[in-house]
Amino acid sequence: MANNFFKVVQINTQLNAALDTEAIKNTQTQIESTKTIINSLKTTIADQKAQLVELTDVGQRADLNAKITANINDLSKKTIEYQSLVRSLATVAYENSAVIAEPKYRVRGFFPIPEPKGNPPQQIVQFEYAYRYLRLDNTGNPLETFQHTDPSSGQVMRGVFTDWIIVQTIAKQKVYDASSGTYTWIVENIADGEVNNINQVDIPIRKGEKVELKIRSISEAGWPSNPLKSTWSNTVIIDFPSNIEGSDQVVNILKDATVEEETIKLDETLSAAGVPTHVADSVPNPNSGTGTYFKHQTVNLAYDLKTKDITGIISEVKTTDLQSQLENLSPYTYVTLTRPNSATHSDPQITGTLQQLLQAIVNIDPSIFDEFRDIIQP
């Protein structure tokens, strides 16, 4: 007996045989590459936003904002590319009715049949092989102890359950020889893949397992009622090869694609609701604890800008961004004055902008203009 008589083979390769495995693997490589770029862009954008809130120079802020915008656009394109690649694999799985099943492996092979012995020669007509699974250090698994009570004596009987599994092969067949008028044994033909042979082995195995195997022969002497069996052969150990995947790589790729497609559908639902747009608009808050954010930038917040006439009635409304309103606070902020007793105009109240009010004050006392000029530019 030698372990090179046997090898580990997959027995359900018929599953997904129509799939273009190379194309699937290439697409998966593109997906992983695109995902790496997406993650890199997300990290870069987060870092740039963190830098942005620390900058005070107008030019530097503008340049960095431009880079952030460009990276966000690139991120959007790569995300669409990623989704397209994932969907292409999911489509392959659906259209080809890919079977999401684990591969099945067996230890298979043939061993030599001993020559007949005795006078007249006694043929070997059958075999038994025994196998067990080993630990990585080639030792057997712990044996379990069981007990039962003997009904005739009441005595508790204890037994140790062996970890050896014995399998009997098929028996050698006889055919009638018309020329001699006798039945003769058929010679085994292991080259014929359509028949089972008495000297073949078929043992289940999975990744990470080892199988220890031994064999003994059964002679035609006394067969079949009281067959003569040989002693067990030496044992051989067959390892699950390290270069064979314990699961089907292509099936795993397609399985991941179908799962990821569901995630993409969720992302699209959130996108339709505008969630990613809101999240992308956040920037770190440098004056607060780690991980806290300003949820939105004012340039992306809407503000209803109202225009009022002299009586305070709103005559026009237009929507602008909050940043523009803050930058032009005085010309867009209204105040209402009540008529004092000494006023020449008869209006009980007048409404105008804060800018108009300040300008009226300066017109009454022009020195205020000079004083203001000296303050802002000594």
Image (cartoon, helix red, strand yellow):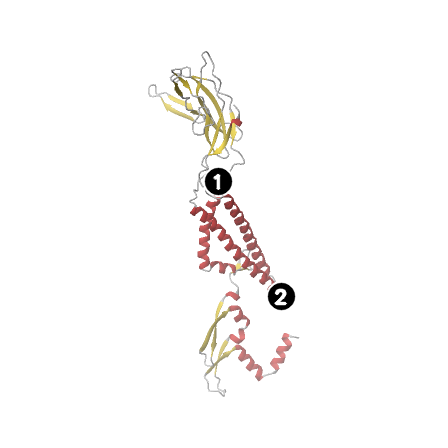
Callout 2 amino acid: Gly
- Residue 334, image x, y percentages: 49, 76
* Callouts 1 and 2 close, C-beta under 8 Å: no
Cα separation, mark 1 vs mark 2, equals 55 Å
Horizontally, residue 178 falls left or right of residue 235, namely left
Q: Is residue 263 placed above or below 236 in the rendered structure?
A: below
* SS class, disc 2: helix
Residue that lies at the very extreme toward the bottom in this rendered image: 344
Mark nearer the viewer, 1 or 2: 1
Q: Is residue 96 placed above or below 165 in the rendered structure?
A: below
Q: Is residue 286 visible?
A: no
- Residue 170, image x, y percentages: 41, 24
Q: Who's the residue at 51% across and 52% down the image?
A: 82
Horizontally, residue 181 falls left or right of residue 307, namely left
Between residues 76 and 220, which one lies in front from this camera angle? 220
* SS class, disc 1: loop
Between residues 40 and 105, which one lies in front from this camera angle? 105
Q: Who's the residue at 53% across and 64% down the image?
A: 297
Q: Who's the residue at 39% across and 25% down the image?
A: 147
Marking on residue 59 = 2
* Label tally: 2
Give the residue at mark 1. 248
Horizontally, residue 71 falls left or right of residue 309, namely right
Callout 1 amino acid: Asp
- Residue 64, image x, y percentages: 60, 62
